[in-house]
Amino acid sequence: MALGPVLVIGLDPARIPGWDPEPVVAAIARGQARFAEHDVEADLCLVAPDDDAEAAVVEALTRRDYACVVVGGGIRKHEPLLPLFEKVVNLVRQHAPGAAIAFNSSPDDTADAALRWLPRDTGGHRTP
């Protein structure tokens, strides 16, 4: 039985000027593959800070009911993006109030972050 679905919100590495996106693109692909290994449905919402990130996040959050939303470190860790991080967290609260919120430390461990919050089967009972 598939778990999830999960929404991953992060920075689009291909749209950050002056930065080689390939290592992050590869890490995101590995992270997405890990979701598949755990039979977890996962959607991506990759935004650029200078675009209308809010509209893209709202569109993604309202696409379906998510069990968990993972906010990526690119949004969370870069101090100049603190207003975007706050906006994303509050949009999750507003548009996906039933979803757990998780944080990864890298694109490679995104599935692990979500799995900490997805319900697990414990002897016939589902618990977070």
Image: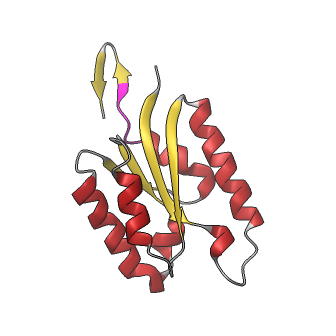
Name the residue located 61 percent from the left edge and 44 percent from the top edge: 32
Name the residue located 35 percent from the left edge and 31 percent from the top edge: 119
Total label count?
0
Q: State whether the magenta stretch is mostly helix, strand or loop.
A: loop
Residue 22 in picture, x, y percent from top left: 77, 64
Span shown in magenta = 116-120
Residue 51 in picture, x, y percent from top left: 49, 77
Name the residue located 57 percent from the left edge and 38 percent from the top edge: 35
- Please indicate whether residue 124 sits to the left or right of residue 8 in the image: left
- Residue 102 visible: no
Quick one: 77 or 8, which is closer to the camera?
8
5 in relation to 46, above or below: above
- Please indicate whether residue 59 sits to the left or right of residue 14 in the image: left
- Residue 67 visible: yes
Residue 118 covered by magenta stretch: yes
Which image quadrant for residue 55? bottom left
Residue 117 covered by magenta stretch: yes
- Please indicate whether residue 115 sits to the left or right of residue 106 in the image: left
Name the residue located 48 percent from the left edge and 53 percent from the top edge: 8
